[in-house]
Image (spheres, helix red, strand yellow):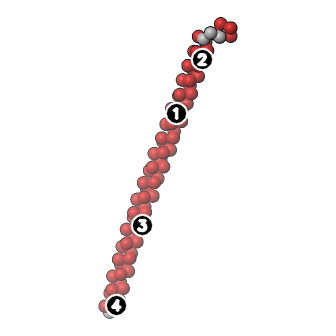
């Protein structure tokens, strides 16, 4: 009878430990998912900044070309 009680106690401890590990794993999975979403949003913002910088560079190069020494020859 005592052996059965001890076995049951050990089994309960193992189940509790397994549940605790599963809970930790789920927390880590959720944190990873949130970080992936953050990275995706950050990537979108970086792409938008890159497009803006490209447009600004084209505008600057256009102004330099139009006002540079070759502007009269190209016109």
Which residue is label 4 attached to?
Answer: 3
Residue at 48% in and 49% down = 36
Image quadrant assignment for residue 28: bottom left
Closer to the chain start, of discs 2 and 1, is 1
* Mark 3 neighbour class, 10 Å CA radius: few under 14, some 14 to 19, many 20 or more: few
User: Which label was assigned to residue 58?
Assistant: none
Of the numbered discs 3 and 2, the one sitting upstream in the chain is: 3
Q: CA distance from mark 2 to mark 1?
A: 21 Å
Label 4: which secondary element:
helix
Residue 18 in the image: above or below residue 55: below
Determine crowd level at label 4: few under 14, some 14-19, many 20+ residues with C-alpha closer than 10 A: few
Out of 68 and 66, give the one closest to the viewer. Answer: 68
Side of 60 relative to 32 (left or right): right
Kindly check if marks 3 and 2 are in contact, taking CB atoms under 8 A apart as contact.
Answer: no
- Front disc: 3 or 2: 2
For disc 1, the marked residue is 48
Q: Percent x, y for residue 67?
A: 59, 10
Residue farthest left in this picture: 2
Return the mark for residue 22: 3
Q: Which type of secondary structure does the marked residue at label 1 adopt?
A: helix
Which of the two discs, 4 and 3, labels the residue nearer the N terminus? 4
Q: CA distance from mark 4 to mark 2?
A: 88 Å
Q: Local crowd at mark 1 within 10 Å, few (<14), some, or many (≥20)? A: few
Mark 4 / mark 2, whichever is N-terminal: 4
Q: CA distance from mark 4 to mark 1?
A: 67 Å
Task: Say above or below: 67 vs 61.
Answer: above
Residue denoted by label 2: 62
Rounded to the nearest angstrom, the CA distance separating label 4 from label 3 is 28 Å
Q: Quadrant of residue 55?
A: top right
Q: Position of residue 27 (x, y in %)?
A: 40, 59
The vertical placement of 3 against 31, above or below, is below
Quadrant of the rendering where the N terminus is positioned: bottom left
């Amino acid at each position: 009878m005592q052996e059965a009680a001890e076995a049951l106690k050990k089994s309960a401890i193992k189940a509790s430990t397994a549940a605790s590990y599963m809970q930790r794993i789920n927390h880590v999975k959720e944190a990873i998912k949130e970080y992936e979403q953050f990275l995706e949003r950050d990537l979108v913002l970086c792409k938008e900044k890159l497009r803006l910088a490209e447009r600004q560079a084209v505008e600057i190069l256009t102004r330099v070309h139009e006002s540079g020494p070759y502007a009269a020859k190209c016109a």
